[in-house]
Amino acid sequence: MEQARIVVVAGDGIGPEVTREAQRVLEAVAPKHGLALAFEEHLIGGASIDAHGTPLRDEVVARARQSQAVLLGAVGGPKWDAMPVATRPEKGLLRIRKELGLFANLRPATVFPALAGASTLRPDVVSGVDMLVVRELTGGLYFGEPRGRSAAGGKREARNTMVYDEDEVARIARVAFEAARGRRKHVTHVHKANVLEVSQLWVEVVDEVAKDFPDVALAHQLVDSCAMLLVRDPGRFDVIVTENLFGDILSDEAAQITGSLGMLPSASLGAGGIGLYEPVHGSAPDIAGKDAANPLAAILSAAMLLEHSLAAHDAARRVRDAVTAVLEAGHRTADLVLPGEQRPTIGCRAMGDRVLEALAL
């Protein structure tokens, strides 16, 4: 049996805690589905800065390129906030995405029935919500040039540049339409074409790509009205596709609809076949080391790894079913309990244990 190499970069804050539980789940489910996994651990973000003086070493990039998938925890924290932007922990994450050509970020936001009451929205509003945000990941304001800060006329100024070409737009649009074909066959393209020339290009190219997918319905939605509709009527959305900045913001909004950022996994994919899988939540330094983190987003990210990088669809389904069973049994980490709700909570390790127990059934 050939081994699949998984590079683990746990990162900072709660990253090592939640990633450990995701790895335990992968180790448990793999033999049941004929998979052999080999894990190797490396540093990224602040942990790498402390050990090596850089947020991401060239050697780690090389090992990631030789792997089948990368499992990542989280990066950053106040310890490194005073550093120059160009050398902060987040640069390690941006670089590994760029180096691996990971242009498509998939963020499913699904309301588990047992958690409908954990959302800050009414249960009748969020019940049945199951959307996928497809975010372009390697272009736009985060990478465009020119960028930087300067002084002009005795005043500080700063600039960032949003740049996309038609090929970048077309390839992410195709990811969205392909995903919609396996779902409810509806794509919503989110833009700001009434103001931005870049968005006008997006509208044109997405319309062109849509002609190759006549079975999938397409709607264009302004980003500001989309933000409103996500909290008013989230069930209307199936697949949302958008550029880097809008996708970053809207996917976090979608996450809160589900009850907690601790429930939102993600996959970053590219043309090279390597995927990077990470929970959407941050490093949460205030609870790091306290066994208080929710590992379910990391575990669900591991399920996406099984599905997208290893084509182990049954194994992925088994992991998701285990998470569902644990939630249906009433187990909760602190982030899944509403203020004032009287419910016992469990820690990160115990939640991982409950998922492993469900997998064994």
Image (cartoon, rainbow, N blue to C red):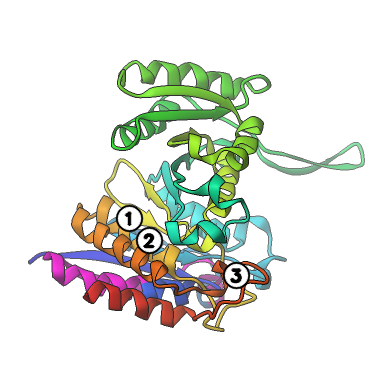
Q: Quadrant of the N terminus?
A: bottom left
Task: Report the residue at 30% width, 72% height from top.
Answer: 25
Task: Report the residue at 51% width, 77% height from top.
Answer: 51
Mark 1: give few (<14), some (14-19) or many (20+) Cα within 10 Å.
Answer: many
Q: Quadrant of the C terminus?
A: bottom left
Q: Residue type at mark 1?
A: Met
- Which residue is denoted by mark 3 in the rendering? 284
- Which residue is denoted by mark 1 in the rendering? 304
- Counting from the top left corner in percent of width and height, residue 103 is at 42, 41
Closer to us: 239 or 10: 239
Say if mark 1 contacts mark 2, CB within 8 Å.
yes
Relative to 181, residue 70 above or below:
below
Say if mark 1 contacts mark 3, CB within 8 Å.
no
Work out which residue is located at the far left of the displayed protein and give it.
1
- Which residue is denoted by mark 2 in the rendering? 300
Disc with the residue nearer the chain's start (1 vs 3): 3
**Residue 328 on the magenta span:** no
**Residue numbers of the magenta segment:** 22-50
The Cα–Cα distance between marks 2 and 3, rounded to whole angstroms, is: 18 Å
Q: Which secondary structure, mark 2?
A: helix
Q: Residue type at mark 3?
A: Ala
- Counting from the top left corner in percent of width and height, residue 341 is at 62, 72
Closer to us: 220 or 15: 220
